[in-house]
Amino acid sequence: MILDRQELCGIAASLAREAGRMVRDGRTHGIGQTSSKSSDTDMVTEFDRASERLIVQRLQRLRPDDAIVGEEGTDTNGSSGVRWLIDPIDGTTNFLYGLPGYNVSIAARSDEGTQVGAVYVPATDELFTAIRGGGARLDGAPIHCSTTASLRHALVGTGFSYLPERREAQAARVARLIGRVRDIRRSGAAAYDLCCVAAGRLDVYYEQWLGPWDLAAGELIAAEAGCRTGSFAGGPVEPSNVLVSNPTLFQPMIDLLRDSG
Ligand code: IPD
Ligand code: CA
Ligand code: CA
């Protein structure tokens, strides 16, 4: 299969930007209807659905043979070998409360892994992109992970599941490790956290129980920015188990996660 990664990245970037601007502008007129999903704090707004609709409609016109999976229910088959993964609003709780920390995340995958990713942050008008083998960029300029060399000086991002039992276990781990790092951040948007490690705004990010749409674009952006990505045990990264850091901090962070788990 011959992939035009430049074309795929251009599509991911322009759709993430278009959908992100639509939801940002729409939000100024109110939040509209909301409902809950996996737990009564896992919310979905009419903007999540409208964003996914817009992206899917455009993709079906531009790339009719590709498969598409979106967090809000899209799951279509394709024959081209390309599969899109869409988080139409990552950071819905931020969006709901009028906080700036949300984004639109779009990735295109093949059997060889994620090929391109785009994460657009409407509040700051920032666009993070990556092409497999071609580096990571913020608004077109190359980005790189931090060079922080010790966990004591590491700013660590993480997030929490919507399920109460899982959140409690995650919070207990944070309590055990916060004394061993510079500080903890919880932005409320996993794709943005991954881009922050890519751009050196965080030194480390870890989280469990993400969805594939949370991870795909941001993980490629981080890897292409020089980060190491994997599971808490150092194996291949999975949505259920995500550790991303600059290369120096990766093994110390595995040790810390083990000791604090
Ligand atoms: C959530 C955010 C959050 C993370 C959760 C995700 P959503 O995505 O990325 O930061 O902690 O695990 O589910 O629900 O806002 O798309
Ligand atoms: Ca998400
Ligand atoms: Ca979402």
Image (spheres, rainbow, N blue to C red):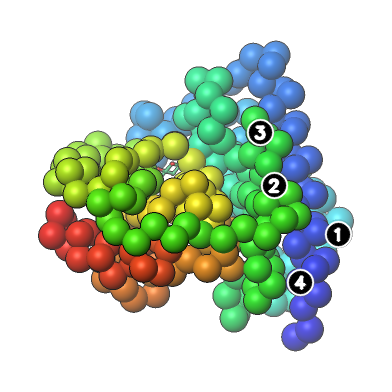
Q: Amino acid at mark 1?
A: Leu
Q: Name the mark nearer the viewer: 1 or 3.
A: 3
Measured in 3D between alpha carbons, the distance from the residue under mark 1 to the one under mark 4, in whole angstroms, is: 14 Å
Q: Is residue 5 left or right of residue 35?
A: right
Residue linked to disc 3: 124
Q: Earlier in the sequence, mark 1 or mark 3?
A: 1
Q: How far from the left and from the top, in percent, is residue 99?
A: 53, 24
Q: Amino acid at mark 2?
A: Leu
Q: Earlier in the sequence, mark 2 or mark 4?
A: 4
Measured in 3D between alpha carbons, the distance from the residue under mark 2 to the one under mark 3, in whole angstroms, is: 9 Å
Q: Name the mark nearer the viewer: 2 or 4.
A: 2
User: Quick one: SS at disc 3?
Assistant: loop
- The residue sitting at 76% across, 71% down in the picture is 5
Q: Earlier in the sequence, mark 1 or mark 4?
A: 4
Residue linked to disc 1: 62
Q: Is residue 133 above or below residue 6?
A: below
Crowdedness of circle 2 by 10 Å Cα count: few (<14), some, many (20+)? many
- The residue sitting at 81% across, 74% down in the picture is 4
**Circles 3 and 4 in contact, beta carbons < 8 Å:** no
- The residue sitting at 74% across, 24% down in the picture is 25
The numbered disc on residue 127 is 2
Residue linked to disc 4: 5
Q: Earlier in the sequence, mark 2 or mark 1?
A: 1
Q: Name the mark nearer the viewer: 1 or 4.
A: 4
- Front residue of this view, candidates 156 and 1: 156
Q: Amino acid at mark 3?
A: Thr
Quadrant of the rendered structure where residue 162 is?
A: top left
**Residue 116 visible in image:** yes
Q: Amino acid at mark 4?
A: Arg
Q: Residue furthest top?
A: 29
User: Quick one: SS at disc 4?
Assistant: helix
Q: How far from the left and from the top, in percent, is residue 219?
A: 52, 62
